[in-house]
Amino acid sequence: MSIDYTQRIPNNVDLSSDRRLQRALENWQPRFLDWWKDMGPDGTLNFDVYLRTAISAEANGWANFGYVKMPDYRWGIFLAGQDPNRVIAYGDNKGKPVWQEVPGELRSTLRRLIVTQGDTEPASVEQQRLLGKTAPSLYDLRNVFQINCEEGRHLWAMVYLLHAYFGRDGREEAEMLLERHSGDPDKPRILGAFNEKTPDWLSFFMFTYFTDRDGKYQLASLAESGFDPLARSCRFMLIEEAHHMFVGESGVQRIVQRTCDLMKEHKTDDVRSLGAIDLPTIQKYLNFHFSVSLDLFGQEASTNAANYYTMGVKGRYLETRIEDDHVLTESTFDMDTADSGLIVRKTVPALSALNERLRNDYIEDCARGLIRWNRVIEQAGIAFELKLPHRAFNRRIGAFNELNVSPEGKVMSEAEWKAGEHKWLPTDEDRAYVTSLMGPAVVEPGKFANWIAPPQRGINNQPANFEYVRFN
Ligand code: BYC
């Protein structure tokens, strides 16, 4: 039976008018669904989940709530509205009209960026595949499923671009997006953090706080692209991304809250004996996820990034609001880097430092959530402060890869680092403890696992005991 794609794939790209494109997506869709069944949330095909679905890109269209079986989720294709007067805001092509088609000389560069972005989306779904088994509540279960469905939609967004603008190469890349898998030794995902495991809910909340936030900054930079369909896709994706970071920020906050409540109530630091997660362990998970996410911004000095900018394919965060010449050939940038075994401050050409500049914007944003988490600790009268580790701590990508640096930013020998590592990063024992808390999913409406506080309000203002997921 043929599928009515206007029904099946809500879209604002007039899909039904392009038979070739429609056929390409018709061929890809069953493969996507097979991938979802094999690699998406485990054992959930029949659940009815209270989900938000975007059915148009208008303000009132992207947040429709209702029960959906996830394989029937309407993965739509939405681009933010087109501005007919939009011009390229930076680089050599500054001031020229944005491209509606891919310029020949930028084809492989753009394809590569779109593939890298697209690869992260299904990767995160794969990483989160088993979390449903140990959800601390129906509210949290629904949130991970919402995120998974939206990451699936973000994959659709990139696959649409590959199919619509990159011909046969694009179709092949779209296939590959379903063939690489997170952590697969033979066909891993492209970027490091997306091959790590997300084995427990503390990791999940840290991931959605720190790694989804990399998504925000990368999408915002691509939203400045001179290739207009990419820019418009990313603008719409950013709306959904906000919920993912909310889940991370509020999730960590609720864990901190519960820990502090128990510390106060029982007048003890030893909350492990009470089945909660102690603050030093939370700090270690934070250290890990922050440092791994910093790597996602690439090398501090990057000719790739300079070329993307000069060509007009990837801008800076909020490019049009920055007051400078938007060409940067004469500008410099001060940054920390490694030289002869030390962290040194250098002045470098601004164009080569664009990854680092974006990383700075990101770090500033990360710090904001910590202020809120620390407020919870302070209000409980507890003398402890969560901190972002130094940017050189535990890095694998970029100049700091060659150094051993403590969270405070002290460069040390490998032996010193090895001796301190257990204080800074989750040990096997820490991970085993956190895993031990992840009991069978809490499925009674309104109930929460012992190690996390309830949220302040429900999704879409639903009451505390709302049945977010119905098991069938
Ligand atoms: N792992 O010149 P450099 C999201 C490679 S998250 C492995 O610095 P560039 C989401 C690099 O590919 C956002 N390899 O590279 C979040 C290059 O390879 P070649 C995802 C790495 O291009 C949660 C070489 O090292 N979107 O949306 O300036 C859930 C030289 O490096 C890594 C994007 O990333 C790494 N971490 O910067 C779901 C946007 N870093 O050329 C979703 C698109 C670097 O030597 N991607 N390499 O073979 C980009 O803009 C750039 O590719 C990067 C790298 C910023 C990632």
Image (cartoon, grey):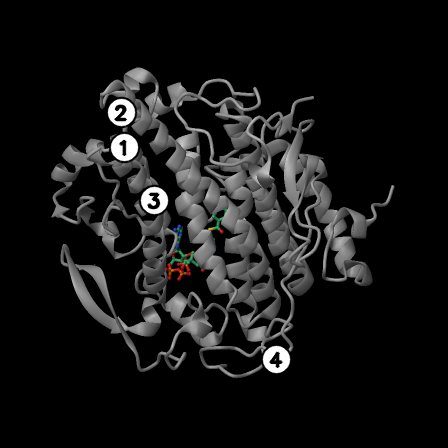
Q: Which mark is residue 380?
A: 1
Quadrant containing the N terminus is top right
- Decide: few, some or many residues near mark 2? Use Cα within 10 Å; few <14, some 14-19, many ≥20: some
Q: Nearer the viewer, residue 270 or 23?
A: 270
User: Residue at the location (41% across, 44% down)?
Assistant: 209
Cα distance, mark 3 to mark 4? Answer: 40 Å
Q: Is mark 1 within 8 Å of ligand 1?
A: no
224 over 54 or under it: above or below? below
Q: Amino acid at mark 2?
A: Lys
Mark 4 CB within 8 Å of ligand 1: no
Residue type pointed to by label 3: Arg
Q: Identify the mark at residue 293; answer none if there is no mark.
A: none
Residue under numbered circle 2: 264
Callout 4 secondary element: loop
Which circle's residue, 2 or 1, is located before the other in the chain? 2
Residue 234: x, y in percent? 56, 60
User: Marks 1 and 2: in contact by CB < 8 Å?
Assistant: yes
Q: In which of the image's four quarters is ligand 1 placed?
A: bottom left
- Taking the spot 64% from the left edge, 61% from the top edge, the residue there is 79
Q: Residues within 10 Å of mark 1 (few under 14, many from 20)?
A: some
Residue 192 visible to an observer of this rendering: no
Q: CA distance from mark 2 to mark 1?
A: 7 Å
